[in-house]
Image (cartoon, rainbow, N blue to C red):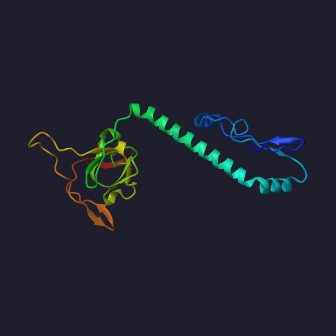
Amino acid sequence: MLGWHVPRAGVDFVSKNPPNFHQVIKLDGIQESRFFSIKVEVFSDFVDHIQKVWKDNYKEILKQLARIQQVFKEELESSIRRFKKYADRNTTIPPDFQSGDKVWVAYNNIKTTRPTKKLSERWLGPFEVWKKVGSHAYHLNLPLKWKSVHSVFHVSLLEPLKNSSIPNQNKFPPPPPPILVEEQEEWEVAQVLDSKLKRGKLWYL
């Protein structure tokens, strides 16, 4: 390995990375490792000295840096595989949706018009899958009223639409289609059943 040393007061070049970084790549600090060792002298013509060292040894320096980079890359990839192995022990295989499939969306982090979460549906939709994004996310075709909601959802927030195994099961009729007013969805009120004051606001049923 290449070592730089001039008999004057020197300053060691050491790694400032946190300890956990070295635990992951299974290597000590740069100064303590067997891959690289540099001592830089502090003297008046420091710049000239560095330029001369680089000119005389740049090929060897580049080779050492390339070897260090390759070792770090291999150790990081090995750590990722090791962490994934332990994480997958308690992880179920996510469903694989295809374009055109119908899915339900969990209402987590989605604001609804319901006064409390207890009165909200557990799942919203169903919506059509447009395409897969990465390995664990899907892009859905959302209605116009959801234009403020990001249309890419993690697979953990999706549930496949399953046909009921009970024949002739009663189903709620679908809501009436909205009316577009200035590009906003609105509904016509057929009848007001009741009203009440709640926290200084008038609510209608």
The residue nearer to you, when weighing 18 against 175, is 18
Tell me what residue is drawn at x 32 percent, y 38 percent. Answer: 118
The residue nearer to you, when weighing 30 against 198, is 30
Q: Is residue 161 left or right of residue 139?
A: left
Q: Position of residue 81 (x, y in %)?
A: 48, 38
Tell me the quarter of the image containing the N terminus: top right
Residue sitting farthest toward the left: 168
Q: Quadrant of residue 141?
A: bottom left
Q: Position of residue 107 (x, y in %)?
A: 35, 45
Q: Position of residue 64 (x, y in %)?
A: 68, 47
Tally of marks: 0
Q: Position of residue 127 (x, y in %)?
A: 28, 52
The residue nearer to you, when weighing 137 against 16, is 16
Tell me what residue is drawn at x 78 percent, y 43 percent. Answer: 3
The residue nearer to you, when weighing 27 against 86, is 27
Tell me what residue is drawn at x 28 percent, y 65 percent. Answer: 180
Q: Quadrant of residue 190?
A: bottom left
Q: Is residue 130 above or below residue 203?
A: below
Q: Is residue 144 above or below residue 21?
A: below
Q: Is residue 69 above or below residue 79?
A: below
Tell me what residue is drawn at x 26 percent, y 59 percent. Answer: 187
